[in-house]
Image: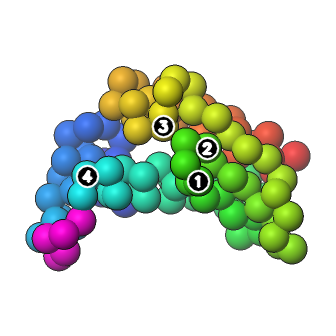
Amino acid sequence: MSLEFPENMREFEDKFAIKKAHNPKVTKEQVMRQTIEDTFQAYLDYAEDGHYDTGKLVGNEIHVVGLHNQLIKKIQPMSESFESDFKANTDKLLTYLEDQADEVAQ
């Protein structure tokens, strides 16, 4: 288990509870979106052997931008949103994010 990158909803709830204790105004949606973005970025940094490109959740897509702020790729969720993908099947989403990071790194 990694509270930084929860692998299921129980771990996510634990992470949210810790964040909420530190910042009572934080919402589950904010924590989930940040978790998804951070997880993708960790996969991307690993695939690229360092932090070269950056993935940001913009609306309902992850936008990957390069060193010169050029858009490299837009990644769509598997269903209507990354949040619903996380809730439905976290393992499947994590595999998808890792695969997408690997594609960007090539």
- For the residues marked 2 and 3, what is the alpha-carbon distance in whole angstroms? 8 Å
Please tell me whether mark 1 or mark 3 is closer to you in this view. Answer: 1
Task: Write down the residue under mark 3.
Answer: 82
Mark pair 2, 1: CA separation: 5 Å
Cα distance between the residues tagged 3 and 4? 14 Å
Is residue 91 something one can see in this rendering? no
Kindly report the secondary structure that dominates the magenta region of the rendered protein: loop
Q: Alpha-carbon distance for marks 1 and 4?
A: 17 Å
- Give percent across and percent down for residue 79: 52, 23
Image-based side of 8 in relation to 106, left or right = left
Q: Which residue is mark 2?
A: 61
Residue linked to disc 1: 58
Please tell me in which quadrant of the rendered image residue 25 appears.
bottom left
The one nearer the camera, 52 or 84, is 84
Q: Which residue is mark 4?
A: 28
- Magenta residues? 22-26
Residue type for callout 3: Phe
